[in-house]
Amino acid sequence: MSANETTPTPTPASNFILQLIDEHNANGKFAGRVATRFPPEPNGYLHIGHAKSICLNFGIAKKYGGTCNLRFDDTNPSKEEQEYVDSIMDDVRWVGFQWDGLYYASDYFEQIYQWAIVLVKKGKAFVCDQTPDQVRETRGTPNRAGENSPFRDRSVEENLKLFEGMKAGEFADGSRTLRAKIDMGHANINLRDPILYRILRAHHHRTGDKWCIYPMYDWAHGQCDSIEQITHSICTLEFEHHRPLYDWFIRELGIYAPQQIEFSRLNLTYTVMSKRKLLTLVKEKHLSGWDDPRMPTISGLRRRGYTPEAIRAFCERIGVSKYEGTIEMAWLEDALRADLNKKAERRLAVLRPIKVVIDNYPEGQVEELDAVNNPEDPAAGMRKVPFSRVLYIERDDFREDAPKGFFRLAPGKEVRLRWAYFVKCNEVVKDASGNITELRCTYDPATKGGNSPDGRKVKGTIHWVSAKHAIPSEVRLYDHLCKVAFPDEVPEGQDFTVNLNPTSLEVVTAMLEPSLKDVAIGTKVQFERLGYFSVDKDSAPGKLVFNRAVTLADTWAKMEKKGK
């Protein structure tokens, strides 16, 4: 399946990883043990793709009564920061998991170095003086064998001395590497004398300046798994062709051997999942930061209003497979709707207000109307909503020239106000420029609660807010980060930023019902008929800020768009 195709719904029950673990438990391969690990590199914030790996690794450990470690692959100090370490730990806990052991690849630097010496002494590793460009040029292609390095046949003694000199800082950065001695003619390019160590003088966030040589991922990863006695080392599919190298190192060292298993990584429509690209968005200030609610990062989704339950449900739904493809963003949004529908209380809010004056409603009168907090949760109870002569309704809920099928407010038409009365529009008031400034209406006092005693039918129900009691609030309406489903596909000579959605954020001043006045940061509510919203961290006393987490289905908007 190509990257620009969306995948069919996978069946979680067909999880091939669980089947393999069951086989191992049946044949006693790991004596019935299950030990997994989640090994992120602390060079950025985690995104929804990492959430899939988190749920998989921690979920497997929980299912089988095993363990799951959190291990930071901190082997590239020039790109790693403590900020990222802290954010990753926070994200794992927020998604809903707690690690059994907390480790770092740097914990094992000395042991990994000693194992490298073992390979040198066995004649299985050598110090190479080729430049990075020369290594690339002599590596060959899938259809052409590589060429041996001219330094490949150095003696064990010379290699040991040079490697010790590398560690002691005797040579310049990039001037030498330690390479495994395998086979430059191997069909798998990863086994063509891969680099184990490079010289890199960079301050490490944990070890400081103790080391000036750092192990490559392929060299360190399997040995870390072995030290921690991991049974099932679960990686994304791009590491499938690295598995023979993983196994080669383990075998040559004669140490405990985990089982590496690969599954397809998560790709989503209308967003980017590359850490490099996400870092670009942050550094070039296309977005406000790693937790910008348009980001696919876990912190961005969290700030937008996503819940850990929704994230876990989404990861469970998409399952695991070996088929590369792209999941539709709608699946993630559906998971959030399903979760918040059960738990989010309903509130009245008007995003783009237009004033409604009810001419026959007594001036100065205020009623407290009963409103259900959540029809999906009877235990959520009721609240009182003030109703008065002057209201706000959504501008989109009125059409001066209403087309067929439009059942909201229009001149001469009657509509039901949620929890309140039937109202009828009698007059449209405009300013000198022809812009509508208010609607003059009348109400039927006999229809309190939205019911008609004479049985007349009113098809439309709209929401409202009492103008006298309304609370102004900044509301941030977020849309997809990218304007196309597959943003990695770009015209020649341009980069992915050309596909960023210029309308991914709209900020409006909304009017809210007064019960939201002192709502806490992080609170999630459904603005009736509009979507689910979350109180942003930018809120302060007297200054509410809401983020739209996800919309509700808008039947009329879809009909109108289809008709254009």
Image: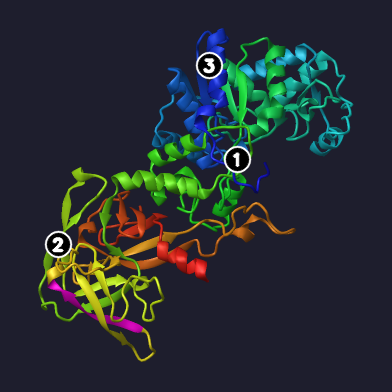
Q: In which quarter of the image is the N terminus?
A: top right
Q: Which residue is drawn at 46% across and 19% down?
A: 67
Which numbered circle lies on residue 79? 1
What is the secondary structure assignment of the residue under circle 3?
A: helix
**Dot 2, crowdedness within 10 Å: few (<14), some or many (≥20)?**
some
Is residue 47 visible to us here? Answer: no
* Res. 369 mark: 2
Farthest residue to the front: give it: 455
Q: Can residue 205 be seen in the rendering of this structure?
A: yes
Q: How far apart are marks 3 and 1 (CA)?
A: 39 Å
Label whose residue precedes the other's in the sequence (3 or 1): 3
SS for dot 1: helix
Mark 1 against mark 2, which lies toward the viewer? 2
Q: Main secondary structure of the magenta part?
A: strand
Which amino acid lies under the numbered mark 2 shown in the image of this protein? Leu
Q: Quadrant of residue 540?
A: bottom left
Front-lying residue, 482 or 85: 482
In the rendered image, residue 409, in percent from the top left (x then y), is placed at 31, 74
Distance from disc 3 to disc 2, alpha carbons, whole Å, reads: 58 Å
Verify whether residue 440 appears in magenta.
yes
Q: Mark 3 points at which residue?
A: 22
Q: Is residue 416 above or below residue 339?
A: below
